[in-house]
Image: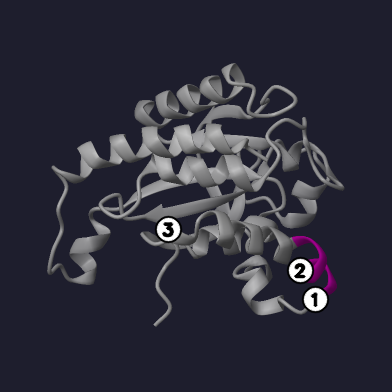
Amino acid sequence: MIKGNILALLILVASSSFAQQSTTIKFTNMDKDTLLQHTDTATLGTGCFWCTEAVFQQLNGVIKVISGYSGGHIENPTYKQVCTGTTGHAECLNIVYDPSVISFDELLEVFWEIHDPTTLNRQGNDVGTQYRSVIFYHNEEQKSKAEKYKKELNTNGAYPNPIITTLESFEKFYPAEDYHQNYFNEHGDAPYCQLVVRPKVEKFEKVFKSKLKKVQ
């Protein structure tokens, strides 16, 4: 977990960056097709995608979250193939968001908080390169911001051990099988969801309460 003072520092930096951005990006009264022309995408690996898909789905400004695979060397991998740890892919989330509502910086805040970026190819009991902590950057700006935050967290000793999150250039994203999508919302009563996913979601809801979508 990030120490409170470091998380506050990152929120301050992100808020400043977002404030500068929001003065120049204003979208009002747009239909759905127009809105989609002004979205950005972040692709983040935090271990098992079941554990964090539900977290990003709740963020205000996030339009769609798709669980899938990226960073490997074969096309159209299956879950079974990825689980062997031999395809090079990481389980990850493709997050489509409205940058006029939520910034990439803010998505990184959540990313750093909701998983352990200090364990190599491992999250809890899930072990293998497919569970690596990774940011697949889509452009140089995303790469620069990810490098900045990683360095800042390591410099300030935010974690007991150094962050080993890899930064990899985004190439292709392959959506996972349908039964993986919206997993926590569809299977919230399953033992794995109760024991592993729900605690992560509840922690996230407390820490990032101000960033959640409003319940209709």
> In the rendered image, which residue does mark 1 sit on?
190
Viewer-closest of 205 and 126: 205
Inter-mark Cα distance, 3 to 2:
23 Å
**Residues marked 1 and 2 touching at CB (< 8 Å):** yes
The kind of residue tagged 2 is: Cys
Location of the N terminus by quadrant is top right
| Dot 3 crowding, Cα within 10 Å, few <14, some 14–19, many 20+ | some
Q: Residue furthest right?
A: 125
Residue 192 seen in render = yes
Which secondary structure, mark 2?
A: helix
Mark 3 against mark 2, which lies toward the viewer?
3
Relative height, residue 216 to residue 123 (above, below): below
| Dot 2 crowding, Cα within 10 Å, few <14, some 14–19, many 20+ | some
The kind of residue tagged 3 is: Lys
Q: Which residues are magenta?
A: 190-196
Relative height, residue 209 to residue 43 (above, below): below
Residue drawn at point x = 43 percent, y = 59 percent? 210
* First of labels 1, 3 by sequence position: 1
> In the rendered image, which residue does mark 3 sit on?
211
Magenta span dominant secondary structure:
helix
Q: Is residue 106 left or right of residue 25?
A: right
Residue drawn at point x = 68 percent, y = 34 percent? 117
Which secondary structure, mark 1?
A: loop
Is residue 6 shown in magenta? no
The kind of residue tagged 1 is: Ala
> In the rendered image, which residue does mark 2 sit on?
193
Which secondary structure, mark 3?
A: helix
Inter-mark Cα distance, 1 to 2:
5 Å
Residue 133 percent across, percent down from the top left: 66, 36
Location of the C terminus by quadrant is bottom left
